[in-house]
Image (tube, helix red, strand yellow):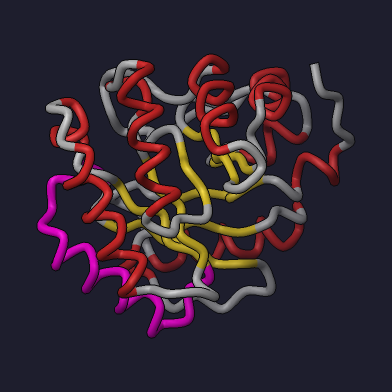
């Protein structure tokens, strides 16, 4: 088990608010809390951009189903980049991955990458709980070829579940130290967060960041 002090753990967190009912006041409060806690970033819905904060700002693209046309995902990513976002977390078309159409998944990722080029950081949400190990590996390999910076386990909205240590380990083995790995979905305790880091996660998507940093149990994303 990796043991991190509070500040080290906070520096790995994307403090997340993606609830459909979230208001602009909720997002402003999220940003203030992120600054207080010292998290790496906040992650908010694209309609909430731009956000004024001293931490990095991430948003989602093709969220949460991934079943959007690539052109729509690309437009969404370009709009986010124009609004000053630092990072985009895109959802792959999970159905294509399950059908073994990995070239199409790769092209979908590439479309978003081209629409939001560096220095915007691109994370690719693969919905690992809905995929086999072989599918996870193939999608991660395609994400790397398409120019992604991170692969990410989950949206936190899929009924199959969120991050697991096994998926994080497999993703890390696949991308080595060339890409980041983000664990998200269902991480609600300090122990679970540290387990994901020990498994290979270099970023954590959490909605209950304060509770987790204080050693309690959170709820939600």
Q: Residue at x 41, y 39 (%)?
A: 141
- Residue stretch rendered in magenta on the structure: 64-86
Q: Residue at x 52, y 22 (%)?
A: 170
Q: Residue at x 16, y 60 (%)?
A: 70
Q: Residue 135: x percent and y percent? A: 30, 25
- Is residue 95 shown to the viewer in this render? yes
Q: Quadrant of residue 69?
A: bottom left
Q: Does residue 74 show up magenta in the picture? A: yes
- In the rendered picture of this protein, how many numbered marks are placed on residues? 0
- Is residue 44 shown to the viewer in this render? no
Classify 187 as above or below 35.
above
Q: Residue 35: x percent and y percent? A: 72, 62
Q: Residue 53: x percent and y percent? A: 62, 74
Q: In front here: 207 or 200?
A: 200
Q: Is residue 92 left or right of residue 81?
A: left
Q: Residue at x 25, y 69 (%)?
A: 76
Which image quadrant: the N terminus?
A: top right
Which image quadrant: the C terminus?
A: top left
Q: In front here: 16 or 219?
A: 16
Q: Is residue 215 left or right of residue 81?
A: right
Q: In front here: 9 or 51?
A: 9
Q: Residue 120: x percent and y percent? A: 50, 71
Classify 143 as above or below 136.
below
Q: Quadrant of residue 22?
A: bottom left
Q: Does residue 81 show up magenta in the picture? A: yes
């Amino acid at each position: 088990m990796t043991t991190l002090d509070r500040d080290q753990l906070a520096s790995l967190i994307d403090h997340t608010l993606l609830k459909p009912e979230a208001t602009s006041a909720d997002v402003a409060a999220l940003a203030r809390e992120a600054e207080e806690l010292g998290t790496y970033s906040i992650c908010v819905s694209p309609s909430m951009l731009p956000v004024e904060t001293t931490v990095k700002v991430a948003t989602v693209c093709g969220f949460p189903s991934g079943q959007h046309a690539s052109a729509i995902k690309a437009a969404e990513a370009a709009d986010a980049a124009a609004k000053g976002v630092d990072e985009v977390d895109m959802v792959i078309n999970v159905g294509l991955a399950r059908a073994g159409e990995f070239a199409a998944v790769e092209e979908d990722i590439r479309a978003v990458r081209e629409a939001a080029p560096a220095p915007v950081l691109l994370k690719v949400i693969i919905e690992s709980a809905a995929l086999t190990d072989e599918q996870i590996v193939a999608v991660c390999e395609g994400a790397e070829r398409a120019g992604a910076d991170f692969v990410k386990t989950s949206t936190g909205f899929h009924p199959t579940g969120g991050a697991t240590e096994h998926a994080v380990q497999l993703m890390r083995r696949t991308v080595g130290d060339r890409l980041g790995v983000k664990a998200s979905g269902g991480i609600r305790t300090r122990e679970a967060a540290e387990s994901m880091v020990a498994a290979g996660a270099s970023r954590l998507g959490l909605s209950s960041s304060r509770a987790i940093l204080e050693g309690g149990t959170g709820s939600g994303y």
